[in-house]
C-alpha cells in the first residue's frame, strides 16, 4: 500500500496584511517550498495524490464552539480594519478574507487523510496544510491556528471508524495546548508533546505545558509533556525522549491510529525553536512511529519557519513514509543534562500510570518546574550569552544524505530443499571462498553444503555492504556456528561495526571482541556474569523471549538507544532455536532494527525454524508488523533489572542515561 500526499495551492492564498512582528514568519512560501521540494526530489510522484476538501460545519464542531465558528464565518466579508479588530481578541494569530476557506481546507485535508488510511486505500500519508491547527482551542484562534486540524481528525476517526485509541505525537517545537485541552480528560486519545519551555519563559508561557500536566479525571496519564528548558537540543535529545518516554508508553497504549502534529520548527535553523536537530532526524522519528498501529500513520503539517530546514524535513518524513531506508545518524553523544532532567521528570510523573515506566527513577533533586521564577538579571544574561551559540538562521548544516533504495530489497540464502518465501530473492551467485576460509570452516565441522552456504552468506554480506541488497534472510544448519563465521571472518574487512542481536541463547558466545568492531546484545532467559564488557550486553528476562512485555521493554529502553549510539554498518539478527519469541514481537524487532545501518539487516535462522520464514520475510520487505496485543505488566524483576543494567552501562553508553 502507498503513501498519501495532500496539498492544494489554495492554502497558499492568504497572508498577513498588516505589520505584526509575531506573525510575520507564517508565510505562504512555507507550503510552496515544502511541496516544490517533494516535486523536485521526485517524491511527490511516488505518493498517491489525494484531493483536499473543506471540512463541514459539523466536522469543525467536533472540536470548536458554534459561537466561534459563526464568528469566523463572518471574516471573509470583513474590511481590513474589521479583520484587525477581530484578530485583537486572539493571541499571535492573524485573519485574512481567505483564511476561513483555507482553514476549512486544512481541516478537511486531515480528514481526507484519515479516510484514505482507515479505508486501506493507503498505508500512511501526509497533509501539507496551512493554517496549522494545534494551538487553536474550542472557542479561540491562537498561534497562527484557526481550526484544530489534528484534534478534529482524532474525533472524526473515533466517530466514523470506531477507532478505540488514537495516539497524537506532536513533534512541533511549540506546545499544542489546544490539543491538550481537547483530550486531557479523554483516555482514548494519548497526547504527547515536546516543546520549548524554558521554565515557562517561552511562548505560550503556560504553567500547564510542564511535565506535571498528566491529564485529568479519566484522562489522567494520557497527556505527556516534555518541556525543553534550553535551546540547542540535538538529535540525541530527541531520540532519547522517544526511546525512554514516548515509545514505552505508546507500545503499552497500543493505538489503532497514529496522528502526528508534524511541525518542523523543531529542526535546526528555525527562528522559533532555535534547536539543533538535523532534518534527517524526522526520518527516524517517522520510522519509529510506523511500527505502531499496523503502520496507520497520518502526519499533518503544523509549524516550520525556516524554509530550508522545513523543506528538507518534509522530504525526510515523506521518504520514510514511502519505506525508503533511513539514513545513519552519526555521533550521537547522548542527551544533554537539561534533556535528561526533562525526560526524568516526565518519566517519574508518569510511572504511576504506565507499567512500562513503573521503575523510572525519582525526579531530579533540582525540581526544574520551580525554576521559572527567574530574576530579570539572569534572564538578561542568558539572552546575551546564548546569542552567539544559538542555532538560529545563521546556523548551517549539511544537506541530508541521499537515501538510495537498493535494487533488491530482501535476498535469501536457503538450503536447496527449502521453498523461498514470497518476495524474497534467492541469492544466485556465490563467491568461491578463499581456501584458508574453507579449511577453517571444515575444521569448524562444517560439511560440504555448509561451505556452500557460507560462501553464499559471504556474497550476501558483500552485496548488503555494497547497497545492492537492503536486507537478507539466511537459513543455516547451525546458527551459532554461522554467527561466529559471519562475525569473525566475513565482516572483518567489509564493515567497520556489526551490531549482533541474539534472540534466545543456546550456548555461551565463546568470544567477545573488545575493539568495538562488534557489539553483541543478547536477550534471553539466562544471565551470564562472565566476560561482560562494554561490547557484550546480556539482557536477562525472567521468562525469556516468550515474554513480549519484557522483550519490548528491553528493545525500546536498551537495544534502540545502544544501536543509535553504536551506529553499526550491519545488523546481524540471530534467532537462536527455541528462543520462544512471539511472532508479532519478532516482526516488530525486525521493523525497529531497520532504523540502523541503512536497513542492512541480516537475519540468521536455523533450518528447523523455517516455519517463521513467512513473517520474517514480511517484516524484511517492510510490511508493517502487527501490533503487540494486550501486553501484560512486565515482571518487576525485569523492569528493575533493566533499570539497573542501564545505570551500570550508562557510563559507557550515553544514550542509556535516564537520570541526571
Ligand atoms: N516570535 C514570534 C512569536 C510567535 N508565537 C506564536 C508561534 C506559533 C507557532 C505555531 S507552530
Ligand atoms: Zn510550532
Image (spheres, rainbow, N blue to C red):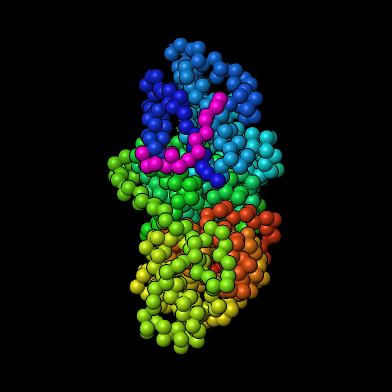
On whether residue 41 falls in the magenta region, the answer is yes
The residue at 50%/69% (across/down) is 413
- Which of the two residues, 621 or 188, is positioned nearer the viewer here? 621
Which residue sits at x=49%, y=83%?
448
Compared with 34, 584 (above or below) is: below
Q: Relative to residue 6, is residue 362 depicted above or below?
A: below
Percent x, y for residue 308?
Answer: 34, 39
Nearer-the-camera pick, 74 or 628 = 628
Residue 343 x %, y %: 51, 53
* Picture quadrant where residue 458 is located: bottom left
Task: Let me know if residue 67 appears in the view.
Answer: yes
Q: Which residues are magenta?
A: 40-54
Image quadrant of residue 587? bottom right
Nearest the eye: 315 or 418: 418
Residue 231: x and y in percent read 40, 46
- The residue at 39%/31% (across/down) is 32
Ligand 1 sits in quadrant:
top left
Amino acid at each position: 500500500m502507498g503513501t498519501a500526499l495532500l496539498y492544494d495551492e489554495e492554502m497558499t492564498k492568504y497572508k498577513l496584511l498588516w505589520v505584526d512582528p509575531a506573525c510575520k514568519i507564517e508565510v505562504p512560501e512555507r507550503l510552496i517550498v515544502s511541496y516544490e521540494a517533494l516535486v523536485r526530489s521526485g517524491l511527490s510522484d511516488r505518493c498517491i495524490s489525494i484531493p483536499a476538501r473543506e471540512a463541514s460545519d459539523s466536522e469543525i464542531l467536533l472540536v470548536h464552539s458554534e459561537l466561534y465558528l459563526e464568528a469566523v464565518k463572518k471574516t471573509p466579508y470583513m474590511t481590513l480594519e474589521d479583520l484587525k479588530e477581530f484578530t485583537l481578541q486572539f493571541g499571535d494569530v492573524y485573519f485574512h478574507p481567505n483564511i476561513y476557506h483555507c482553514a476549512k481546507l486544512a481541516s478537511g485535508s486531515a480528514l481526507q487523510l484519515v479516510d484514505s488510511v482507515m479505508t486501506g486505500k493507503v498505508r500512511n500519508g501526509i497533509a501539507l496544510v496551512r493554517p496549522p491547527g494545534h494551538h487553536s482551542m474550542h472557542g479561540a484562534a491562537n498561534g497562527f491556528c484557526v481550526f484544530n486540524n489534528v484534534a478534529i481528525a482524532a474525533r472524526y476517526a473515533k466517530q466514523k471508524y470506531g477507532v478505540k485509541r488514537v495516539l497524537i505525537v506532536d513533534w512541533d517545537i511549540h506546545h499544542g495546548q489546544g490539543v491538550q485541552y481537547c483530550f486531557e480528560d479523554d483516555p482514548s486519545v494519548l497526547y504527547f508533546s515536546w516543546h520549548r519551555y524554558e521554565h515557562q519563559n517561552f511562548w505560550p508561557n503556560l504553567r500547564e505545558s510542564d511535565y506535571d500536566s498528566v491529564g485529568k479525571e479519566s484522562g489522567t496519564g494520557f497527556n505527556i509533556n516534555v518541556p525543553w528548558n534550553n535551546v540547542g537540543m540535538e538529535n540525541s535529545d530527541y531520540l532519547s525522549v522517544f526511546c525512554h518516554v514516548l515509545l514505552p508508553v505508546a507500545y503499552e497504549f497500543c493505538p489503532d491510529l497514529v496522528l502526528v502534529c508534524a511541525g518542523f520548527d523543531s529542526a535546526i535553523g528555525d527562528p522559533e525553536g532555535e534547536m539543533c536537530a538535523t532534518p534527517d532526524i524526522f526520518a527516524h522519528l517517522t520510522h519509529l512511529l510506523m511500527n505502531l498501529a499496523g503502520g496507520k500513520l497520518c502526519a499533518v503539517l503544523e509549524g516550520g519557519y525556516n524554509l530550508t530546514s522545513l523543506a528538507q524535513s518534509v522530504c525526510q518524513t515523506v521518504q520514510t513514509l514511502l519505506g525508503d531506508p533511513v539514513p545513519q545518524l552519526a555521533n550521537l553523544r547522548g542527551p544533554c543534562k537539561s534533556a535528561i532532567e526533562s525526560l526524568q521528570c516526565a518519566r517519574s510523573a508518569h510511572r504511576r500510570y504506565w507499567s512500562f515506566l513503573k521503575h523510572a527513577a525519582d525526579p531530579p533533586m533540582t525540581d526544574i518546574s520551580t525554576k521559572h521564577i527567574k530574576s530579570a538579571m539572569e534572564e538578561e544574561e542568558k539572552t546575551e550569552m546564548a546569542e552567539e551559540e544559538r542555532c538560529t538562521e545563521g546556523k548551517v548544516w549539511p544537506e541530508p544524505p541521499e537515501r538510495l533504495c537498493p535494487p533488491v530489497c530482501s535476498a535469501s540464502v536457503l538450503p536447496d530443499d527449502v521453498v523461498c518465501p514470497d518476495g524474497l530473492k534467492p541469492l544466485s551467485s556465490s563467491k568461491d571462498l578463499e581456501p584458508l576460509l574453507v579449511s577453517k570452516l571444515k575444521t569448524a565441522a562444517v560439511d560440504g553444503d555448509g561451505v556452500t552456504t557460507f560462501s553464499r552468506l559471504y556474497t550476501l554480506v558483500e552485496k548488503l555492504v555494497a547497497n545492492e541488497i537492503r536486507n537478507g534472510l539466511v537459513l543455516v544448519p547451525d546458527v551459532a556456528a554461522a554467527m561466529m563465521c559471519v562475525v569473525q571472518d566475513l565482516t572483518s574487512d567489509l564493515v567497520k561495526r556489526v551490531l549482533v542481536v541474539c534472540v534466545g541463547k543456546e550456548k555461551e558466545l565463546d568470544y567477545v571482541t573488545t575493539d568495538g568492531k562488534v557489539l553483541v546484545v543478547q536477550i534471553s532467559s539466562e544471565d551470564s556474569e562472565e566476560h561482560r564488557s562494554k561490547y557484550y550486553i546480556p539482557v536477562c528476562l525472567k521468562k525469556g523471549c516468550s515474554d513480549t512485555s519484557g522483550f519490548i521493554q528491553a528493545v525500546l529502553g536498551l537495544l534502540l538507544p545502544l544501536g543509535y549510539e553504536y551506529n553499526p554498518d550491519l545488523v546481524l539478527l540471530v534467532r537462536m532455536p527455541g528462543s520462544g519469541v512471539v511472532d508479532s514481537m519478532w516482526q516488530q524487532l525486525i521493523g525497529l532494527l531497520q532504523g540502523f545501518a541503512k536497513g542492512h539487516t541480516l537475519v540468521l535462522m536455523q533450518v528447523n525454524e523455517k516455519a517463521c520464514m513467512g513473517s520474517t520475510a514480511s517484516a524484511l520487505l517492510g510490511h508493517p508488523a502487527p501490533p503487540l496485543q494486550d501486553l501484560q505488566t512486565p515482571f518487576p524483576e525485569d523492569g528493575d533489572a533493566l533499570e539497573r543494567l542501564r545505570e551500570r552501562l550508562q557510563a559507557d553508553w550515553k544514550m542509556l542515561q535516564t537520570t541526571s
